[in-house]
Amino acid sequence: MVQPLWSALDATCGPWVGEGALLCVSGGPDSRTLLESVARWPGRFDGLVRVASVDHGTRAGSRAEAESVAARAHALGFEAAVLTPAVRGLDEAALRAARYQALVAHARRAAVPKPL
């Protein structure tokens, strides 16, 4: 039953795990499901997978949501961080740019070549 999921993770994440990968997880249900799936994926042990969640600070509860993602990631055995990027503007494009910049910078600091 989970073999299609493992195959998909092998194809999309597998090539990066050996070098190190940064799994970017929001607090949404799809993203949290991905976190839970990667935690159970046998390939996660082929290298290092770290987790990051971004708090844009644009709504009440966003910090708690990002911290709960990091706490769950820690409980699943991952190194995890909450990132708080400098946001210039509240439109989706500005938020996306700030998020990507923060994730790429964190990946570099963590010596991880690829944010996923």
Image (cartoon, rainbow, N blue to C red):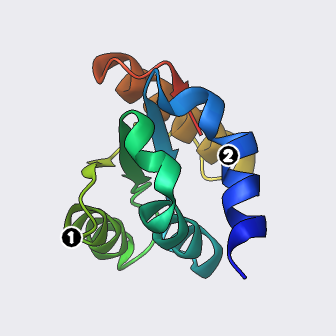
Residue located beneath label 1 in the image: 75
Q: Place residue 116 in its image quadrant.
A: top right
Image check: 46 left or right of 91? left
Q: Place residue 46 in its image quadrant.
A: top left
Residue located beneath label 2 in the image: 10
In the rendered image, the vertical position of residue 16 relative to residue 3, given as above or below = above
Task: Give residue 113's position: percent from left, percent from top.
Answer: 49, 18
Q: Nearer the viewer, residue 73 or 102?
A: 73
Residue appearing at x 47%, y 72% in the figure: 36
In the rendered image, the vertical position of residue 36 relative to residue 113, given as above or below = below
Q: Find the distance from the CA under tag 1 to the CA under tag 2.
A: 23 Å
Q: Depth-wise, is mark 1 or mark 2 nearer the camera?
A: 2
Image check: 114 left or right of 77? right
Task: Give residue 62's position: percent from left, percent from top.
Answer: 39, 71
Dot placed on the residue nearer the N-terminal end, 1 or 2: 2
Q: Return the mark for residue 32.
A: none
Residue appearing at x 42%, y 52% in the figure: 54
Task: Give residue 44's position: percent from left, percent from top.
Answer: 45, 48
